[in-house]
């Protein structure tokens, strides 16, 4: 059956799912829209310079790459902390079949939100970083942390689904691993911008007309994960 194949796929490829989810989080319209401003702020380089990165000096390019790594480390700290919490706190509870069914339902709800079919007030809140203040070398890290904690309206549905999925692996280091892979997927596009700024920013501008398609694809992926969890949990419970 299709449901069996779907469950087998997500069970066999959780890291691929987490990595893809990280990339989809980056491509969420409200994240993608602020990427040039974020990169400009953490690097101290103007958006115009980033769009013409071939004019950057070697020192400026190295600075851009270093600050991108620090920014990624900032948001990865928070996401991986979620994974560690899952491993420590949900070692047994989240691996029960009832928890699997409930987790699947939650993921389906996230999918409906991502598709704009329903609204979740919690995700309408978001902390916004003050771009006007800098704290020297720590600024990219602090901005990375605030990005992870604050942009819930953008990353919330996908992140929530992956956290729910990772908690199913709690107690075996699985949640930490999945959240690490998610951070890698989210961080990779930022690194591409740091290394190939003008080319990457140009490519991202070409993606903007397809925002709705990205949302639909993301919602389908999340929905499929949720359905597979629900089906697998109910199947085991009814045996």
Image (spheres, rainbow, N blue to C red):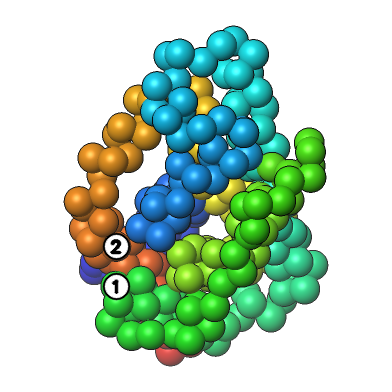
Please report the residue visible at 26 percent of the width from the left and 56 percent of the height from the top: 211
Q: Which residue is nearer to you in this view: 25 or 128?
A: 128
Q: Are marks 1 and 2 in contact (CB under 8 Å)?
A: yes
Residue 96, image x and y in percent? 61, 80
Residue 48, image x and y in percent? 42, 30
Residue 26, image x and y in percent? 44, 50
User: Is residue 172 among the parts visible in the rendering?
Assistant: no
Q: Which residue is mark 2?
A: 215
* Quarter of the image where one finds residue 212: bottom left
Q: Which residue is mark 1?
A: 115
Image position of 22 with respect to 197: above or below: below
Mark 1: which secondary structure? loop
Q: Which residue is nearer to you in this view: 57 or 185?
A: 57
Residue 55, image x and y in percent? 45, 13
Dot 1, how many residues are within 10 Å of its Cα: few (below 14), some (14-19), or many (20+)?
Answer: many
Q: Which mark is residue 139?
A: none
């Amino acid at each position: 059956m299709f449901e069996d194949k779907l469950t087998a796929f997500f069970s066999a490829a959780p890291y691929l799912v987490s990595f893809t989810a990280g990339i989809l989080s980056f491509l969420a319209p409200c994240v993608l829209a602020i990427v040039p401003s974020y990169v400009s702020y953490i690097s101290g380089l103007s958006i115009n310079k980033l769009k013409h990165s071939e004019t950057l000096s070697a020192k400026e390019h190295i600075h851009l790459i270093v600050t991108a790594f620090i920014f990624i480390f900032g948001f990865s700290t928070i996401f991986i902390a979620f994974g560690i919490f899952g491993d420590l706190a949900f070692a047994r509870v989240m691996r029960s079949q009832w928890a699997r069914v409930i987790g699947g339902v939650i993921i389906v709800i996230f999918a409906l939100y991502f598709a704009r079919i329903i609204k979740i007030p919690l995700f309408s809140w978001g902390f916004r970083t003050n771009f006007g203040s800098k704290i020297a070398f720590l600024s990219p890290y602090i901005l990375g942390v605030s990005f992870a904690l604050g942009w819930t309206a953008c990353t919330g549905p996908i992140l929530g689904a992956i956290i729910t999925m990772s908690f199913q692996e709690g107690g075996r280091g699985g949640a930490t691993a999945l959240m690490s892979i998610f951070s890698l997927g989210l961080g990779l596009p930022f690194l591409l911008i740091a290394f190939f700024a003008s080319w990457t920013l140009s490519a991202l501008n070409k993606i903007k007309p397809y925002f709705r398609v990205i949302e639909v694809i993301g919602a389908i992926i999340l929905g499929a994960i949720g359905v597979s969890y629900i089906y697998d949990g109910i199947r085991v419970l009814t045996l």
